[in-house]
């Protein structure tokens, strides 16, 4: 009898425990409380997040005044349906998804634009060919086409289940189907939620809203410090030279660009400028560069800026290594010490060195390599750092740390810089850097350029090599319509004229970029003042309705037993600013489809009407990249110049007007070199075309261009 009572007691206790455990967990699941920060911006703190996060390391303040100038907007979802709880050192978040809702963002992806239905671990790494969250800039920020977005402000590896998890208590449950008899059965049943797992005891969340996705992205960019305006020379043409080039080799390179009459504003020096590299000394090699200061001055006189390659790991027993000993991590990279730049003293050591040996002699910027991955050569997650921040946090923020180190010294000198970086994260939007990598798929490069616009990033589809003349010119055309027009010839010494039979169209598109500098520069001013990405996805354009093509998955009993019908994304066209639609062409592509937003669109080169809110097929020539212009657009252009030093106030400006609609364009200008624009030293001129009559009027500042310099050209007749 006693034994019977014992088992009955165990059964009762088991029942009680099984009932209490879910209730206890349910008590922990709560809806975050949101506090309004600015117009259309809310913040919530879930439990006890780490003070070290993506925004704190970047040390940039929100541009609250610019955000508050935007019309306020409500939250388009029920906040009570957002839930969060912390358990066993992890924080779990859930956001509701509507049936047709689509998601964008999550950083720099190379193959996908739409992110619903994907599982990712957001982890800074060298891109390995799959959009699984391991990428150079895995920004934990998403944008919904319901016109809201959320930043998960954590410097951790974050797991994302983007419309994949199916809960048993779903408000919109998936339809249960019998695979044996129902051909609508799916291996991926409908999911109505977006979920995150953050390995911390809490997390800070920032929500952004707007009347459309563009406004959401604008608020995100402005909250992270706002965009930036590059120096004018940064928007010219860049040539990176082979690893072991000397000063005399560089002189010949510059002379070649002069002789060939090809634009050139920046020369990039690769690892050979260091006395030792991989890891680095940050000291000039005396054999290849016996007089660095004299060489830099000579280049400046030729209108050429110097950009220096570096990785941040220090050569053993170099001057920097000895000074940095108190501030290094437990592990090395390529036998080089890894400084902890979250420590102010470590930043000061590096900044003093860079200022004395590079910046003060005339170096214009840096290319910062290997701050992303692979796991095989970066520090492991077992590494420790003297600041107390762990290896995971350092991995997620090291790119931002290096950008901060260099940004601060250029700002202290009131000299704008522009450079390249291999890793970034949320908070980097105001740093003057463009992301690049070693991956080399031309179509995927364009997809990455599109994706960058959702996450406060800039990306360059740099040119390195090609298998044919056609591929070469197509790559050159794409890079000239990106944030940085650059050939990276560090490995093979390629030049713009490496394929002589297509040199002329390469030269033409480079000069076209130079002619469009007033337009591009004004577009970057929007980035700074309004948070608008200068190069942006079509989904951020009013009137754009993405056209998709269904592709049926082929059932394979062993290789693909759960085949799905998938939809082809539109990921090969984008906007440069408000008015120019860019449609790159790839190797062996004889024709391509173009999805036009609502409104009339015109051929950039001829002014010919193309279409309105429809899909058209074009057959582009090899000589020109397809460009299309929105109705009412005013496109300012200057004459062909080879270097930005020729871009002066006296240059005539052609104002090309497209279509019949009345239009306006705000033409921005400043000194092109300093940060004085941040304190109001700039000009904005309003260009208006109303009923076929063009007018020029000042909005702000002293007029930098004479009204007589403007010539109106009506392209569409």
Image (spheres, grey):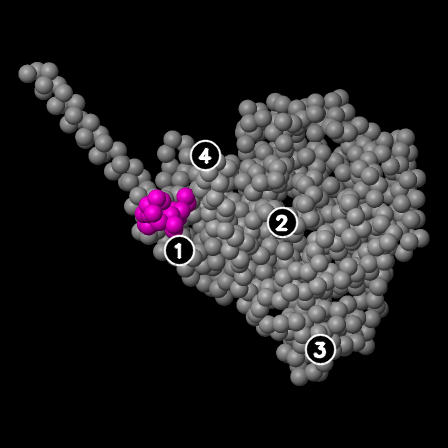
The x and y percentages for residue 221 are 57, 54
Location of mark 2 (residue): 448
Left or right for 44, reference 243: left
The residue positioned farthest toward the left in the image shown = 1
CB atoms of marks 1 and 2 within 8 Å:
no
Quadrant in which the C terminus appears: bottom right
- The CA span between labels 1 and 4 is 27 Å
Q: Nearer the viewer, mark 1 or mark 4?
A: 1
Q: Is residue 438 visible?
A: yes
Left or right for 157, reference 418: left
Seen at 60% across and 64% down, the residue is 595
Location of mark 4 (residue): 199
Location of mark 1 (residue): 98
The label on residue 120 is: none
- The CA span between labels 1 and 3 is 43 Å
Give the secondary structure at mark 2: helix
The x and y percentages for residue 80 are 34, 52
The x and y percentages for residue 476 are 77, 53
Q: Which residues are magenta?
A: 173-195
Give the secondary structure at mark 1: loop
Q: Is residue 231 visible?
A: no
CB atoms of marks 1 and 4 within 8 Å:
no
Q: Is residue 52 above or below residue 151?
A: above
Identify the mark nearer the N-term, 1 or 3: 1
- The CA span between labels 4 and 2 is 28 Å
Location of mark 3 (residue): 716
Residue closest to the eye, 529 or 189: 189
Identify the mark nearer the N-term, 1 or 4: 1
């Amino acid at each position: 009898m006693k034994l019977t009572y014992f088992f009955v007691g165990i059964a009762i206790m088991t029942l009680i425990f099984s009932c209490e455990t879910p209730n206890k967990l349910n008590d922990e699941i709560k809806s975050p409380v949101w506090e309004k920060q600015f117009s259309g911006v809310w913040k919530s703190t879930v439990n006890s997040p780490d003070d070290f996060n993506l925004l704190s390391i970047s040390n940039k303040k929100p541009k609250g005044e610019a955000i508050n100038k935007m019309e306020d907007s409500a939250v388009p979802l029920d906040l009570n349906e957002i839930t969060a709880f912390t358990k066993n050192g992890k924080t779990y978040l859930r956001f509701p998804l509507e049936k047709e809702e689509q998601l964008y963002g999550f950083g720099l992806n190379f193959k996908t634009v739409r992110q619903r239905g994907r599982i990712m671990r957001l982890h800074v790494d060298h891109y390995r060919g799959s959009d699984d969250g391991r990428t150079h800039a895995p920004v934990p920020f998403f944008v919904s086409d319901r016109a809201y977005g959320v930043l998960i402000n954590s410097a951790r590896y974050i797991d994302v289940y983007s419309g994949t998890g199916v809960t048993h208590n779903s408000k919109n449950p998936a339809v249960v189907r019998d695979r044996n008899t129902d051909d609508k059965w799916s291996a991926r049943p409908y999911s109505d939620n977006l979920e995150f797992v953050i390995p911390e005891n809490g997390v800070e969340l920032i929500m952004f809203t707007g009347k459309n996705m563009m406004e959401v992205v604008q608020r995100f960019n402005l909250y992270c410090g706002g965009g930036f305006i590059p120096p004018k020379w940064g928007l010219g043409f860049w040539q990176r030279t082979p690893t072991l080039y000397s000063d005399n080799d560089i002189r010949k390179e510059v002379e070649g660009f002069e002789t060939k009459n090809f634009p050139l504003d920046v020369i990039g020096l690769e690892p050979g400028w260091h006395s030792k590299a991989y890891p680095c000394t940050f000291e000039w090699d005396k054999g290849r560069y016996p007089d660095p200061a004299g060489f830099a001055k000579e280049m400046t006189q030729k209108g050429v800026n110097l950009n220096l390659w570096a990785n941040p790991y220090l050569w053993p027993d170099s001057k920097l290594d000895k000074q940095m000993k108190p501030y290094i991590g437990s592990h090395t990279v390529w036998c080089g010490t890894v400084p902890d730049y979250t420590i102010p003293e470590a930043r000061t050591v590096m900044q003093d060195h860079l200022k004395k040996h590079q910046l003060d002699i005339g170096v214009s910027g840096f290319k910062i390599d290997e701050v992303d991955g692979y796991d095989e050569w970066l520090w492991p997650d077992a590494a420790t750092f003297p600041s107390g921040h762990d290896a995971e946090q350092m991995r997620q923020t090291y790119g931002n740390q290096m950008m901060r180190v260099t940004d601060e010294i250029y700002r202290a000198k009131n000299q704008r810089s522009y450079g390249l970086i291999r890793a970034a994260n949320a908070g980097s939007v105001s740093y003057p850097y463009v992301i690049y990598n070693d991956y080399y798929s031309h179509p995927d490069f364009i997809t990455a350029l599109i994706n960058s616009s959702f996450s406060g990033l800039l990306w360059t589809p740099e040119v390195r090599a090609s298998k044919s003349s056609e591929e070469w010119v197509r790559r050159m055309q794409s890079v000239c319509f990106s944030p940085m027009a650059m050939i990276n010839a560090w490995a093979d010494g390629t030049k713009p004229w490496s394929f002589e039979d297509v040199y002329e169209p390469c030269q033409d598109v480079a000069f076209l970029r130079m002619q469009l500098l007033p337009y591009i520069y004004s577009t970057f001013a929007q980035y700074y003042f309004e948070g608008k990405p200068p190069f942006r996805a079509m989904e951020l354009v009013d009137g754009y309705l993405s056209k998709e093509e269904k592709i049926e998955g082929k059932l394979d009993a062993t290789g693909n037993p759960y085949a799905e019908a998938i939809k082809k994304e539109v990921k090969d066209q984008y906007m440069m600013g408000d008015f120019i639609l860019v449609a790159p062409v790839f190797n062996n592509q004889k024709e391509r489809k173009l999805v036009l937003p609502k409104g009339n669109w015109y051929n950039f080169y001829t002014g010919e009407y193309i279409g309105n809110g429809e899909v058209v097929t074009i057959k582009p020539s090899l000589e020109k990249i397809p460009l299309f212009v929105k109705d009412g657009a005013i496109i300012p252009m200057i004459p062909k110049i080879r270097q930005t030093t020729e871009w002066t106030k006296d240059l005539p400006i052609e104002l090309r007007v497209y279509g019949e609609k009345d239009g306006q364009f705000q033409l921005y200008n400043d000194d092109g070199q300093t940060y004085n624009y941040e304190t109001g030293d700039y000009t904005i001129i309003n260009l208006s075309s109303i009923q076929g009559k063009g007018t020029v009027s000042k909005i702000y500042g002293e007029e930098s261009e004479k009204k007589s310099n403007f010539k109106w050209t009506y392209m569409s007749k």
